[in-house]
């Protein structure tokens, strides 16, 4: 048997195996993500009131059973918190293509300043959304 025929006999099944493995890879992606004043995602915003509840609506495409989505809320630079204070980290395995994360400060007003929301898909940082908290009611 020639070397060429032997190479073809070995390479074709190998290429088919590689193709089958690639098609099994999780192809989930975040198709959209944004901050809202409401859980339905009808009132988009980049600026919140100090009394607000923060909502982030994420839409996934191709979500599989092994998909993990994480939201990490960070107070980057505010008037009453140390720089880059992690406020909350929430990780879920979505059952649906739409996920809504919620962050609420039940006992106090949010410190005014700049915040960031880090969204991780399957452990990899997918995007960072920056937003601001404006009016400081605790100063009144």
Image (cartoon, grey):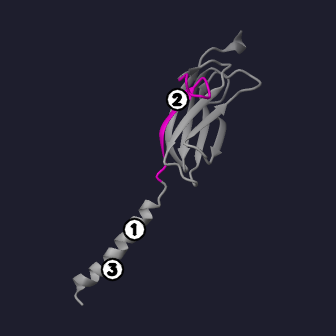
Residue 127 placed where, x, y %? 49, 39
* Circle 1 Cα neighbour tier, 10 Å, few/some/many (<14 / 14–19 / ≥20): few
Image coordinates of residue 6 in percent, x first then y, are 28, 84
Residue 99 % position (x, y): 59, 39
Q: Which span of residues is magenta-colored?
A: 27-44
Residue at horizontal 58 percent and vertical 45 percent from the top: 69
Relative to 135, 61 lies left or right:
left
Which residue bears the numbered disc 1?
18
Contact flag, marks 3 and 1 (Cβ < 8 Å): no
- Residue 10, image quadrant: bottom left
Give the residue number, with chain letter if any, for mark 2. Answer: 130
Q: Report helix, strand or loop for mark 2.
A: strand
- Which residue is the site of mark 3? 10
Confirm whether residue 84 shows in the render.
no
- Of residues 39 and 109, the one drawn nearer to the viewer in this rendering: 39
For label 3, the SS is helix
Q: Which image quarter: residue 21?
A: bottom left
Q: Which mark is residue 138?
A: none
């Amino acid at each position: 048997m020639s070397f060429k025929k032997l190479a073809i006999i070995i390479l074709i099944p190998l290429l088919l195996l590689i193709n089958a493995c690639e098609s099994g890879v999780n192809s989930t992606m975040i198709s959209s993500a944004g901050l809202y004043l409401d859980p339905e995602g009808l009132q988009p915003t980049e600026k919140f009131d100090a009394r607000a509840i923060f909502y982030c609506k994420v839409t996934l495409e191709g979500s599989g059973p092994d998909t993990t989505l994480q939201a990490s809320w960070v107070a980057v630079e505010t008037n009453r918190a140390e720089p880059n204070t992690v406020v909350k980290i929430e990780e879920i395995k979505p059952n649906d293509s739409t996920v809504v994360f919620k962050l609420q400060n039940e006992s106090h007003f949010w410190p005014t300043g700049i915040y960031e929301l880090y969204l991780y898909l399957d452990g990899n940082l997918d995007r960072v959304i920056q937003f601001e908290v404006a009016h400081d009611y605790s100063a009144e």
